[in-house]
């Protein structure tokens, strides 16, 4: 099968990329477009390190054929980060020491962003459920859960989130 051009919006910018059939979005983002915040972990959909937002919802880019994002909106951590600092979710992760090695952080942060967009005041149980697809081997999750709670408060307090 022949390669084809796939057009989609990446971090607010119209993007066109030539892809071979069944090339994953993760490979396109990292290797063709240089968006290395999207991590390569298990490549089987089990760790969540490759999580990006597709039309605002978390998806595992290691399982998603790039052709399937045609005409849609993809957000990576690079697209979440404002030019003049950190998004409130990123700030909360930093302030609450929820980032250690950083490998799971992009997926955790994007998953948190999606959660807070649809549920601005999640319970602790809802937070745990939302991040359950993202594996962290460093933090023990307590700091991450506290960061999500702090991000919810920060966003509710009027800080602007994109």
Image (cartoon, grey):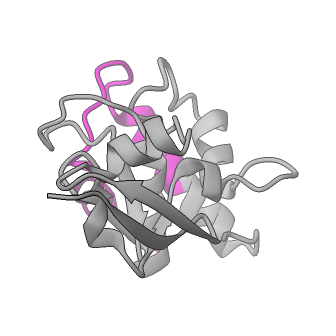
From the top left corner, tell me how far across and down residue 24 is, in percent.
Answer: 26, 49
- Above/below status of 110 relative to 161: above
At 48% across and 42% down in the image, what residue appears? 32
- Above/below status of 160 relative to 52: below
* Foreground of the two, 101 or 26: 26
Judge from the rendering whether residue 131 lies leftward or rightward of residue 55; answer left or right.
left
Quadrant in which the C terminus is drawn? bottom right
Judge from the rendering whether residue 12 lies leftward or rightward of residue 35; answer left or right.
right
* Foreground of the two, 142 or 74: 74
From the top left corner, tell me how far across and down residue 101 is, in percent.
Answer: 47, 18
Task: Specify the farthest residue to the front.
Answer: 2
From the top left corner, tell me how far across and down residue 76 is, in percent.
Answer: 51, 54
Picture quarter containing residue 58? Answer: bottom left
Magenta residue check for 136? yes
At 57% across and 28% down in the image, what residue appears? 97
Magenta residue check for 93? no
Using the rendered image of the protein, determine whether residue 157 is visible from the camera's viewpoint: yes
* Total marks placed: 0
Using the rendered image of the protein, determine whether residue 111 is visible from the camera's viewpoint: no
At 41% across and 63% down in the image, what residue appears? 53
Residue numbers of the magenta segment: 120-149
Judge from the rendering whether residue 131 lies leftward or rightward of residue 35; answer left or right.
left
At 13% across and 39% down in the image, what residue appears? 46
Quadrant in which the N terminus is drawn? bottom left
């Amino acid at each position: 099968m022949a390669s084809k051009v796939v057009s989609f919006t990446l971090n607010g910018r119209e993007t066109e990329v030539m892809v071979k059939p069944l090339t994953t979005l993760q490979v396109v983002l990292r290797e063709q477009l240089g968006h290395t915040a999207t991590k390569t972990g298990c490549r089987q959909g089990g760790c969540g390190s490759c999580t990006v937002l597709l039309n605002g919802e978390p998806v595992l880019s290691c399982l998603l054929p790039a052709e399937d994002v045609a005409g849609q909106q993809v957000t990576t951590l690079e697209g979440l980060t404002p030019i003049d600092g950190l998004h409130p979710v990123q700030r909360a992760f930093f302030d609450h020491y929820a980032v250690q090695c950083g490998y799971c952080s992009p997926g955790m942060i994007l998953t948190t962003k999606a959660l807070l967009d649809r549920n601005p005041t999640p319970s602790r149980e809802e937070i745990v459920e939302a991040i359950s697809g993202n594996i962290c081997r460093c933090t023990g999750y307590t700091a991450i859960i506290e960061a999500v709670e702090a991000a919810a408060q920060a966003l509710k307090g009027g800080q602007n989130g994109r």
